[in-house]
Image: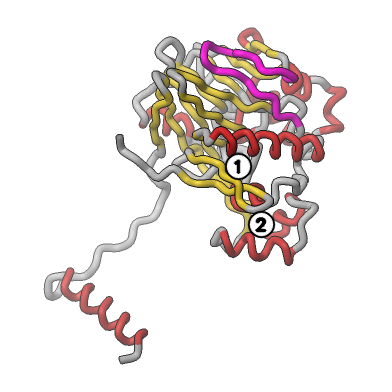
Amino acid sequence: MDRRLFLAGGAAALAAAALPAGATPPSQRSGPHTPGWHRVRIGDVEVTALLDGAMQGNNAFIQNFFPDSTPEELAPLRERAFFVEQGLHQPVGAYLLNTGRNLVMIDCGGHASFIPTTGRTLESLRASGYAPEQVDTVLLTHIHPEHALGLSFDGRTRNFPNAEVVVSDADHAFWTDPAMESRVPQGPRFIEAARRAIAPYTDRIRRFPHNREVEVLPGIVSMPAPGHTPGHVSFRITSQNQSMLIWGDIAHQTVIQLARPRWRVGVDVDRDAGVESRVRTLTFLAEERMLTGGVHVPWPGFGRVIRDGEGFAWVQRPLQFT
């Protein structure tokens, strides 16, 4: 029997068996997904990944994003990743840490006023069992809109009313100093969003040195990763001899960038420094076999980095319930 006919016939038989005589199948549902969160433990620290949404770049954007690439080099990587035809799809997430003494956000998502398909972090946070009022610290990897606009959508309201905002000195200066404006690759729109995000917290911002590791909170250490922005950092969490790293934008797309970690990124302020930070961070993670999270890694937001030929690969941690 022709295989296609066999499969079609089997599907029809299953459909017929599932419905009573005279019944019609229910209409398909549409609309937004339910709020997303997923939780793991690192020693005594509870780490919750929160889904904020996603970003979508068109196909022309991919070539601009990876200026060292060619369409011929990109094609097999896209095929390997089962890419959507429309272009470069990137999840957007954030992380909540309950250390037992602090309730900490690492980045806090974006807002639909800037990227229409982002802005669900507060919804996901509440669905996970916490309230924004309980958060006492927000650690920022850098002040890009999809990482920081969750602080304040309108430049007046503190979405985390009791929180201190902690960011590297170089990143804070980059987004607030008028002399730096010409260095922002994305231009005035990004500058306005960054300033709007942190404006209500002016008297609650703590800055730390960007060029060395700093214990920003007990058990949480910043790791310099300049290039994407001058003060871009990752954060390492350690408890009970267990560790994990949460990166901001070491990689925006785990298949392409991990396979070709030395490709420069078009939106990096210092493209060469971005490559150096990416290779150094990925090498560290592969050697340590450390659990990792990142704002743009595949949902549900946890995995590990391994070596793969001349590059690296992302190994997703499956969704687990214990």
- Position above or below: 111 against 315: above
**Is residue 55 in sight in this rendering?**
no
Residue hosting label 1: 115
Instruction: Residue 20: name its quadrant.
Output: bottom left
The amino acid beneath tag 2 is Asn
Residue 153: say if magenta. Answer: no
Task: Point out residue 140 in the picture as x, y percentages from the top left corner.
Answer: 61, 24
Compute the Cα span from label 1 to label 2.
14 Å
Sequence-earlier tag: 1 or 2: 2
In the image shown, does 104 or 290 lie closer to the viewer?
A: 290
Task: Point out residue 73 in the picture as x, y percentages from the top left corner.
Answer: 72, 62
Q: Which residue is drawn at the image coordinates 52% and 40% (left, top)? A: 304
Q: Is residue 234 left or right of residue 4?
A: right
The quarter of the picture where the C terminus appears is: top left
Q: Is the residue marked by circle 1 packed among few (<14), some (14-19), or many (20+) residues within 10 Å? A: some
Q: Which residues are magenta?
A: 210-226
- Position above or below: 178 against 298: above
Q: Which residue is drawn at the image coordinates 31% and 80% (left, top)? A: 7
Residue hosting label 2: 58
